[in-house]
Amino acid sequence: MMKVYVPADAAAIAVGADRVAADIAREGRMRGIAVEVVRTGSRGMAWLEPLVEVETPAGRVGYGPVGATDVPSLFDIDFLAGAAHSRSVGLVEKIPFFARQNRLTFARCGVIDRLSLADYRAHRGLAGLERAITLGPAGTVEEVKASGLRGRGGAGFPTGIKWQTVAGAQTDQKYIVCNADEGDSGTFADRMIMEGDPFSLIEGMTIAAIAVGATRGYIYLRSEYPHAIATMNRAIEIARAERVLGAHILGSAHEFHLEVRVGAGAYVCGEETSLLDSLEGKRGQVRAKPPLPALQGLFGKPTIVNNTISLATIPYILAEGAQKYADFGMGRSRGTMPVQLAGNIKHGGLFETAFGITLGALIEDIGGGSASGKPVRAVQVGGPLGAYFAPHQFDIAYDYETFTKADGLIGHGGIVVFDESVDMARMARFAMEFCAIESCGKCTPCRIGSTRGVEVMDKIIAGQDVAKNKALIEDLCETLKFGSLCALGGFTPYPVLSAMRLFPEDFGAAPDLAHAAE
């Protein structure tokens, strides 16, 4: 039976992947051809979705983007043998966007049947868990520390140090919590891994549980991701049935129980302590620190809170060894990062690469520049609270320390591109408005400061006392940055101040007043 691979990723489904998969199966039956349609994750090349792949002796040949109307003609030219067609993209792994990647965390995404544990095992799945059982808790923690893995959710804190803290805590109960509340603009790595390789997250969380002595875990997943919720729940059922979860994991003495909890759309619940409050059934509000969640987290017990990508990377580290992972990257930024290219960009998608590539290479070489064909004017790196960068800064290396020195953030790896038509004063206003809307309300600088920030930005845009109000914005940003309880208020100044510094021409008189003066 011939296999045809069609993504079940939400981005592919949004442009007709389900219809394409159904039509391929139906067309095969009509022609008397035995075809098995395998639903995979996405390879991350959004402009080619739905990307249909077939296995050939030379490798997988792709066709995309494929619409339902293309299906009969694909059969006409015998696409099952990899024949040429107007939708042909050749060998998928030779596509430049894909070939230049360092696929470690996402190695299986788009390749395997996402809900087949047998397929997962055939591609080195569970090798990391088996090694963790052999190494034991202390050895597993040391392996993660040696890898140099840092949190991929935004803060960049060393994962091994967090695990070591929880492992050393003496208590009757510990928890593993996956922060899958992916809310940053232009980010989709968490969703992609959960929809395309859910067992990697399950394996990573189980390894974490063994390392620190936890027996219960939760995946806090946002309600806006229904496909990811369904896929993770089904994968957990399969893992439980196959003794990858539950009592006596893979025949060992270890025990770990895992479940999905769905959030209700609050951006602030991406902050770890707000997330924990939400998990406990409370309103999601930021907790003061200390105590740290590693010592007093969920229900007051020691808790590991890691991002989805951090946890999904753990199986690779344990399976292949810490040194092999640490060999990628630069400085203190080790391993790879799934960079998500979005906004006004020709080749948007997920590009997993070692730290050290330049911002310009990501935007121009990998992403192909703007989708509109107009010059790129600005890019925002690190989500809605990330700083803006202008083209003259595109030689900056993509790593934690370099971005920190440039008053920027790596964040969750999102990069949003804007062409020359963007109004940066309105983008700065949006940052203040976003903070005002999403604030949990617990601290005054964030709750009140952001609201006043919107009002002052409106005055600047209207051309009212521009110099005075710009000075007021800078003073307000200082208060937000150092007075807010969490990163929501603390990072809002990054986009505001970077936009003002890099694009001062957008913060003068309102356009209509400027034209009147001419």
Image (cartoon, helix red, strand yellow):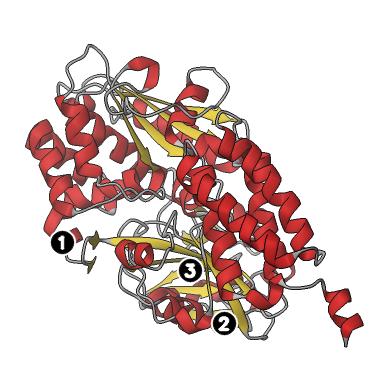
How crowded is the residue under tag 3: few (<14 C-alpha within 10 Å), some, or many (20+)? many
Q: Amino acid at mark 2?
A: Gly
Give the residue at mark 1.
324
The percent position of residue 123, horizontal first and vertical second, equals: 28, 54
Residue 203 visible within the image: yes
Q: Residue at x 33, y 66 (%)?
A: 399
Q: Amino acid at mark 1?
A: Lys
Q: Nearer the viewer, residue 385 or 199?
A: 385
Closer to the chain start, of discs 1 and 2, is 1
In-front residue for pair 462/85: 462
Q: Is residue 459 left or right of residue 436?
A: right
Residue extending farthest to the right is: 516
Q: Which residue in the rendered view is the most extreme toward the top?
A: 172
**Secondary structure of residue under mark 2:** loop
433 shown above or below 211: below
Visible residue check, residue 93 = no
Q: Which residue lies at the image location 13% right of the left edge and 34% below the top edge?
A: 133
Q: CA distance from mark 1 to mark 3?
A: 31 Å
Q: What separation in Å lies between label 2 and label 3 (alpha carbons)?
A: 30 Å
In the displayed structure image, the side of residue 301 where residue 418 appears, left or right: right
Which is more foreground, mark 1 or mark 3?
1
Query: Does residue 175 appear left or right of residue 14 in this picture?
Result: left
Give the residue at mark 2: 369
